[in-house]
Image: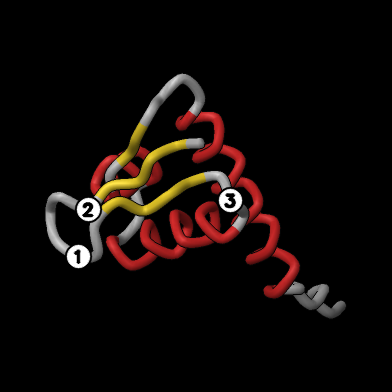
Amino acid sequence: MSVPKRDITKEAKEKHAEMMKKLEEFLIGKSEVANDEVQNFLGISDASAERYLDELESQGKLTQIGKTGSKTHYQIK
């Protein structure tokens, strides 16, 4: 009896979509958010939080204020 092959790409896409949905729900009612808030809320790394925020920015849902450092945050549209 063989073990069914896992579709890791599909699982990763589903996990990504789930995390994006959680993040978008987290942002409801907020005017701005910082990377560390996203890290703490989703339990992810700095780099992962930055990727999620960059994705929302590319979708036109956020505007990044500042380039780097602790004062950088995202304004929610």
User: Which numbered dot is residue 72?
Assistant: 2
Amino acid tagged 3: Gly
Residue nearest the viewer, comparing 7 with 23: 23
Picture layout, residue 48 above or below residue 44? below
Asked if residue 26 lies left or right of residue 9, the reply is left
Residue nearest the viewer, comparing 52 with 15: 52
**What residue did someone put label 3 on?**
60
Q: Residue at x 63, y 66 (%)?
A: 12
Tell me the crowding category of disc 1: few under 14, some 14 to 19, or many 20 or more residues within 10 angstroms, Cα based. few
User: Which numbered dot is residue 11?
Assistant: none
Sequence-first disc among 2 and 3: 3
Asked if residue 73 lies left or right of residue 19, the reply is left
Amino acid tagged 2: Thr
User: Which numbered dot is residue 68?
Assistant: 1
Asked if residue 15 lies left or right of residue 47, the reply is right
Asked if residue 71 lies left or right of residue 54, the reply is left
Q: Are marks 1 and 2 in contact (CB under 8 Å)?
A: yes
Badge 3 marks a residue whose secondary structure is loop
Q: Residue at x 27, y 47 (%)?
A: 73
